[in-house]
Amino acid sequence: MLNNFLHFHEASVGSTQQEALRLWQECGSELYFSADEQTMGRGRMQRVWSSPVGNLSLSLALTPSRDLMYSLGFIASLSVLRAIQGFMAQSDGSIVLKWPNDVLLGGAKCAGILIEYHQHPCEALILGIGVNIRSVPENAPYPVTSLLEQGIVCTATEFQDAFIREFQLLRSELQRSGANSIYKKWSNAAHPAGTELNIRTLKENFSGTYLGLTSTGTLQVKLDTGEIREVISADCFIAEGI
Ligand code: BTN
């Protein structure tokens, strides 16, 4: 059976991250929580994530083994990409994954993934997925788009069902074949090696040429000085776009 998650839904919540965590702590099972809108949606790097009715706001509570944890964000962005492709009349190459977990359509961000790690009562990941289905936020610090703006028509519920299906399929593959097969699929759908990236970590900003993912899914870039760096956590922007 593929879909063995419990599912909870509410019309309006602060953040689905909080609700998924609370329910997981109460019932101890893997689950996902969706809402029509969030009033306090959170993004990466402490940013606000705008979540009006019509867009997808969903959080999964997952309890993977520690060695598979890091790859779940890659599975989530691949699942978003595959779900979008399922609603596209024809695949035209305008959809690209950007490290670590962004989905770009026509060069602009249409979806984001937030990964929060918890330890009580045992290790769990709360994986938040936000997709701009109908509308885009104002004043975003990078170019943004929505599926609708790109001519892709679906409802948040239709998208959610397609996303969960793809997520379950890729997670089975992860368990069967290991993280490398996921990293390979992610790399095939991402910006190519040689792409110039601007990288912002909590400590510094620097630029480099994308070389690929390491065997653990971290980013490998080559600096102008020739130094090769491994990046574990950062905001990353394609130099010629976002
Ligand atoms: C990013 O900044 O790119 C990540 C955005 C993640 C947004 C989703 S929407 C569902 C879940 N609930 C939240 O408060 N945030 C995540």
Image: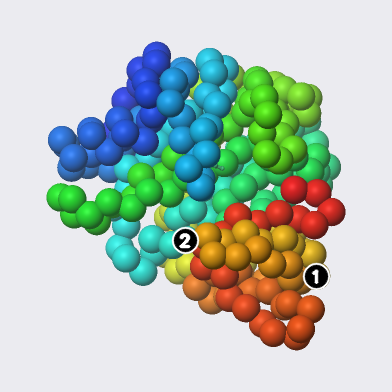
**Which residue lies under the disc numbered 2?**
71
At x 51%, y 47%, the residue is: 45
Q: What residue type is labelled 1?
A: Gly
Disc 2 residue lies near ligand 1 with CB under 8 A = no
Image coordinates for residue 12, horizontal then vertical, percent: 39, 16
- Furthest residue in direction bottom, as rendered: 226
Which residue ends up furthest to the front in the rendered image?
Answer: 203
Against 106, residue 215 (above or below) is: below
**Which comes before the other along the chain, label 2 or label 1?**
2
Q: Quadrant of residue 100?
A: bottom right
**Vertical position of residue 70 compared to residue 25: above or below:** below
Could you say which quadrant of the image residue 25 lies in?
top left
Task: Residue under label 1, please give it.
Answer: 194
Residue closest to the eye, 225 or 129: 225
Left or right of 175, for residue 192: right
Residue under the image location 60 percent in, 55 percent down: 235
Q: Which quadrant would the N terminus be assigned to in this image?
A: top left
Three-letter amino acid code at the position of disc 2: Ser
Please say if the residues under marks 2 and 1 sit with CB atoms less than 8 Å apart. Answer: no
Where, by quadrant of the figure, is residue 72 drawn? bottom left
> Do we see residue 217 in this rendering?
no
User: Quick one: label 1, few (<14), some, or many (20+) residues within 10 Å?
Assistant: few
Residue 102 rendering spot, x and y as whole percentages: 62, 47
User: Which SS class for mark 2?
Assistant: loop
Residue at horizontal 71%, vertical 54%? 237
Q: How is the rendered protein coloured? A: rainbow
Q: Is residue 2 above or below residue 157?
A: below
Foreground of the two, 204 or 121:
204
Residue 127's place in the image compared with 135, above or below, is below
Name the spot of residue 166 as percent of width and height, x first: 52, 43
Disc 1 is placed on an element classified as: loop
